[in-house]
Each structure stands twice: as C-alpha cells, then as structure tokens.
C-alpha cells in the first residue's frame, strides 16, 4: 500500500511539474507587439512585466501588425515605405520587405498562412503576397481608401474595408475578383468579425458611427452613434462587449453588444489609435500616439493600470500567443 501511495504521489508530482512547465511556457510565449511609425520598428512587450523583450526593425511608417494563425510570422504594414516587413516572430528577426501598394496600411493573413493581403489606401487596391516565397504576386483594385482586411475562416474570401467608398469589398481569393460590396460607415476603419462569424462590427469615423453587418446574408443590420471619430475596435472573447477608441475625444468606450449602447468611457491619452485585448478578455492595450505610450487598461471598468513608454508615434498593437 505504501509503495502504491509513493508511486501515485510521484505521478501526481510529475504531472503537476509538467503542467506547470506547460503553463509557464504559454505565459512566457504571450507577447504584446506595438508598431512605432516614426521609429520604423516594432517593440515586443511581456504582458506581465510590461518590459521590452525585443525591438525589431521594420520600415518607414510601421503602421499595423498582424500574425499568422500559428503565431510564427508577423506582418508589419509600412505606410511610409509602401511595403510589408515579414518577421520571424519566434526568433524576432526580419525576413523580408515585400513591395506593396501606396501607403500599405494593414495585412490580413489566410488561415493556412500561405497568402497575405495588403490593404493600400493610397492606391485603392490590395496586394496579394505569396508568403512562402515572400513575394508579391498580384494587385487588384477594390475601392477608394482600402484600409483593413480580414479573411473568412475558410480562407475563401477576403473582406476589404474601403474608407473612401464607405463599403466593404468581398474578394474571392482564388478567382482574384470582387464578387460583392457591402455597405459600411463613411471612412470605415476597423473590421471586427464575431467569433462565430455571424456578424461584424465596423467603425465609421467620418460620420461617428459603428456599423454592424450580417456576414451570412451579406447585408447591413444596423448602425448607431459613437461620437468622437471611432477608430480602433475589438470585441470581448465572449462577444458581449465592444471596446472602441474615440480618437478625437481621446478616450475609449465600452459598448454593450446586445443593446448597442455605450456603458462607460475613460480617458485614453492623446490621439489614441488602435486597441487589442488579452485572450481572457480582462486587459486592453491601447496605443497613444502623441504620448508615445502603450496604455494598459482593465477591460471591466476601464481603469488605467499602466502607461508604458514606446518608440515614436506608436500605432498598431496586437496580442501574440
């Protein structure tokens, strides 16, 4: 009996150590990435200590950051250099600068990681990149001010928000053609699909609106007022809350998704731009461009937890697991 007890205890100990190691590894792998436009780089922060893990060169106007689904690659859209920096996110090393269109603003990556779509508002088009070859392979017009893109879960379509045309292009990636346009807010910026992909929330900063689209029927569900030039937007993991950066008001708003009403606002520095959320939904990360800071905010009550110095003119922010 004693031998069995010792053996059982040993097994429990080994399992506990293994679980702790795995959880520790996951914690260490978690990172917050911030792009700095004037510094032409991206900084990687530990979300627990808020210390800089790495500073990686990108190119002029490093604007937004996107990850491949496996988290192994990062894509930095450089608005000042009209290109995209592909980075080995594990080794923290740049791999290539791939030419794109004018004022490359943001990158969407296909679920299989093989194709990237660069949205180019200056030329009103998108650039398709063959990721394994690290090469631009196709360019097509979508609409004025092609700002942000998102791939459908099956990788068949890319949704491209066109700010100047106040619409969203649905692009068949294999056929390389636009098959539908969806209504959106004027100056449409953020495009945030729900986790079930039934709806998407979009900001319309030029008319102080947030627009909700039905992604199954490809039609507009509703639009409601969000003052102060709504810009970056994220949804909570459970889809019950949206967080919107109100750039002209220098604040962030918490919105109840069911009633579509603002329940709370809080200051967010000077000229806040983009916002990311931790996987557990407890923490927001907001870039404050004129302050050269990353703001760490409690999602529940919008209380400021920390202000972290960044490079010059931080803009994009994303959470990497």
Image: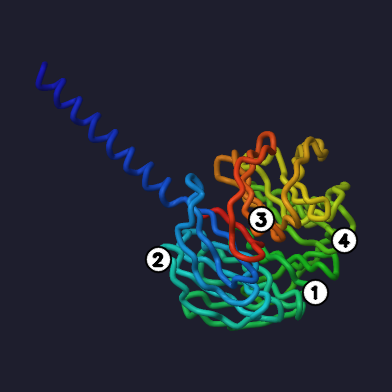
Is residue 98 positioned above or below 162 on the image?
below
Proximity of marks 1 and 3: CB atoms separated by less than 8 Å: no
> Nearer the N terminus, badge 3 or badge 4?
4
What's the CA distance linking mark 2 and mark 3? 24 Å
Residue 280: % across, % down: 55, 40
> Nearer the N terminus, badge 1 or badge 2?
2
Q: Which residue is mark 3?
A: 287
Q: Residue at 85% across / 69% down in the picture?
A: 165
Label 3 vs label 4, nearer the camera = 3
Using a 10 Å C-alpha cutoff, classify the residue at mark 2 as few (fewer than 14 neighbours), some (14 to 19) or many (20 or more). Answer: few
> Nearer the N terminus, badge 2 or badge 3?
2
Q: Which residue is mark 4?
A: 206
Instruction: Residue lying at the far top in this picture: please name it.
Output: 1
Element marked by disc 1: loop
Residue 55: % across, % down: 49, 65
- Residue 4 relative to residue 301: left or right: left
Element marked by disc 4: loop
What's the CA distance linking mark 4 and mark 2? 40 Å
Query: In what quadrant of the picture does the N terminus appear?
Result: top left
Using a 10 Å C-alpha cutoff, classify the residue at mark 1 as few (fewer than 14 neighbours), some (14 to 19) or many (20 or more). Answer: many
> Nearer the N terminus, badge 4 or badge 2?
2
Residue 58: % across, % down: 55, 73
What's the CA distance linking mark 1 and mark 2? 36 Å
- Is residue 243 at least partly visible in the picture? yes
Element marked by disc 2: loop
Proximity of marks 3 and 4: CB atoms separated by less than 8 Å: no
- Residue 55 relative to residue 293: left or right: left
**Which label was assigned to residue 143?**
1
Q: Which residue is mark 2?
A: 91
């Amino acid at each position: 009996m004693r031998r069995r007890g010792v053996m059982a205890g040993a097994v429990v100990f080994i399992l506990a150590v293994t679980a702790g190691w795995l959880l520790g590894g996951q914690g260490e792998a978690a990172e917050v990435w911030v792009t700095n436009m004037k510094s032409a780089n991206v900084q990687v922060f530990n979300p627990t200590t808020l210390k800089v893990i790495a500073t990686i060169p990108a190119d002029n106007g490093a604007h937004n950051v996107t990850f491949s689904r496996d988290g192994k690659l990062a894509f930095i859209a450089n608005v000042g250099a009209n290109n995209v920096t592909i980075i080995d996110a594990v080794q923290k090393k740049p791999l290539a600068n791939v030419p794109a269109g004018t004022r490359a603003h943001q990158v969407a990556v296909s679920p299989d990681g093989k194709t990237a779509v660069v949205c180019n508002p200056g030329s009103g088009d998108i650039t398709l990149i063959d990721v394994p070859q690290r090469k631009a392979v196709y360019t097509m017009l979508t609409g004025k001010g092609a700002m942000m893109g998102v791939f459908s879960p099956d990788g068949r379509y890319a949704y491209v928000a066109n700010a100047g045309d106040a619409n969203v292009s649905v692009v068949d990636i294999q056929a390389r053609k636009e098959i539908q346009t969806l209504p959106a807010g004027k100056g449409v910026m953020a495009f945030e699909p729900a986790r079930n992909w039934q709806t998407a929330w979009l900001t319309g900063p030029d008319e102080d609106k947030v627009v909700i689209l039905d992604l199954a029927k490809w039609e507009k569900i509703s639009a409601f007022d969000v003052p102060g030039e709504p810009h970056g937007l994220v949804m909570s993991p459970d889809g019950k809350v949206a967080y919107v950066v109100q750039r002209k008001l220098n604040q962030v708003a918490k919105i109840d998704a069911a009633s579509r009403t603002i329940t709370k606002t809080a200051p967010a520095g000077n000229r806040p731009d983009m916002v990311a959320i931790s996987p557990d939904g407890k923490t927001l990360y907001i870039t404050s461009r004129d302050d050269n800071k990353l703001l760490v905010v409690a999602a529940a009550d919008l209380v400021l937890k920390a202000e972290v110095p960044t490079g010059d003119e931080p803009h994009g922010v994303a959470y990497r697991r």
